[in-house]
Image (cartoon, grey):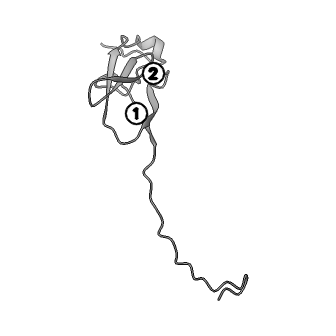
Amino acid sequence: MCRKCGSSQSTAAQPATSTPPERFHLKTRIFYEGTETPVSGARYEIVDESGRRVRMGTTGEDGFVMESMPAGGQYKLRVVEFPDMPDEGESGASPETTE
């Protein structure tokens, strides 16, 4: 019997149901090959397992790709336009000197 309401019905604890998330967050960063310089302005697309494009975008100055994706699928990120690497002076790095 319930001390608070006086009911004689017993209620069993309900098992916790675990529902899979509806979305997940894709976060990655694109760099120029062989460097630690992020690619700013790279155009990309994200395709599902059937090859259908589900997202497209452009990286920011930091080279990051951040998208919210439907859960339960497999996706591929394709860079469709890869800008040239900036000159040494544009990136803020000091130019190398040779003797």
Give the percent coordinates (x, y) of residue 18: 44, 59
Q: Quadrant of the C terminus?
A: top left
Q: Which quadrant holds residue 80?
A: top left
Residue nearest the viewer, comparing 71 with 79: 71
Identity of the residue drawn at 27% across and 31% down: 49
The kind of residue tagged 1 is: Thr
Q: Quadrant of the N terminus?
A: bottom right
Q: Seen in the image, is 46 located left or right of residue 59?
A: left
Residue nearest the viewer, comparing 59 with 46: 46
Label 2: which residue?
59
Q: Which quadrant holds residue 19?
A: bottom left
**Against 91, is 21 above or below?**
below
Residue nearest the viewer, comparing 30 with 67: 67
Identity of the residue drawn at 33% across and 38% down: 73
Circle nearer the N terminus (2, 1): 1
Give the percent coordinates (x, y) of residue 61: 49, 21
Label 1: which residue?
28
**Against 65, is 8 above or below?**
below
The kind of residue tagged 2 is: Thr
- The residue at the far front in this view is 8
**Against 37, is 14 above or below?**
below
SS assignment at label 2: loop
Q: Seen in the image, is 51 located left or right of residue 20?
A: left
SS assignment at label 1: strand
- The residue at the far left in this view is 50
Give the percent coordinates (x, y) of residue 86: 41, 12
Identity of the residue drawn at 46% across and 62% down: 17
